[in-house]
Image (cartoon, rainbow, N blue to C red):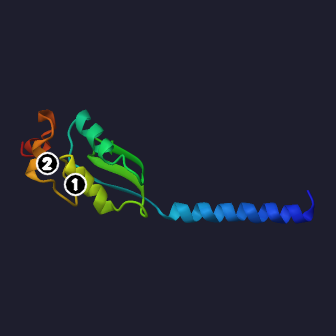
Amino acid sequence: MNFKNFIKTSAFAILLILCSEVKAQNTIETSFQVSGICEMCKARIEKAVDVKGVKSANYDLDTHTLTIAYSSKTISESDIHLLLNEVGHDTEKSTCSDEQYDRVHGCCKYREHENH
């Protein structure tokens, strides 16, 4: 490889690295509490956030924690909380309506378990 090709290849590699760094800066990873008590809840919670802009999501039943990575250019954290409310789950920042909560399966009635 001659010097001119080496410079072109190096410049291209640097440009690729810089572009990937800019893209990575738009990805936010966070965790927050979501009410849920069973495997059906886990599946519903993870499915609710399986939307454009969400790169990964994992709900831990033991800790009631959703760990999520998403593109801040595509979706906001408040939008994510609202998606969870729409399927009947309260989060640490928002509460679903009684109508939304009433649509979850009987074994998923986490509010009733919180009071016992």
Q: Earlier in the sequence, mark 1 or mark 2?
A: 1
Task: Identify which residue is drawn at 41% across, 60% down.
Answer: 74
Pointers 1 and 2 in contact (CB under 8 A)?
Answer: no
Amino acid marked by disc 2 = Gln
Look at discs 1 and 2 and give the one toward the viewer: 2
Where residue 41 appears, x then y in whole percent? 23, 39
Q: Residues within 10 Å of mark 2 (few under 14, many from 20)?
A: some
Residue drawn at x 28%, y 62% as measured from the top left: 78
Image quarter (top left, top right, bottom left or bottom right) of the N terminus: bottom right
Q: Residues within 10 Å of mark 1 (few under 14, many from 20)?
A: many
Secondary structure of the residue carrying numbered label 2: helix
Q: In this view, does 97 lie to the left or right of 12?
A: left
The amino acid sitting under disc 1 is Thr
Q: Is residue 97 left or right of residue 7?
A: left
For numbered disc 1, what is the local secondary structure? loop
User: How much space separates mark 1 and mark 2, taking CA atoms?
Assistant: 13 Å
In the image, residue 100 sits, relative to residue 73, either above or below, namely above
Q: In this view, does 102 lie above or below 33?
A: above
> Is 6 on the left-hand or right-hand side of 55?
right
Quadrant of res 19 = bottom right
Identify the residue at horizontal 64%, vertical 65% (top origin): 18
Q: Which residue is drawn at 22% across and 61% down?
A: 93
The residue to which callout 2 is attached is 100
User: Which mark is drawn over residue 91?
Assistant: 1
Work out which quarter of the rendered image holds the C terminus and state it.
Answer: top left
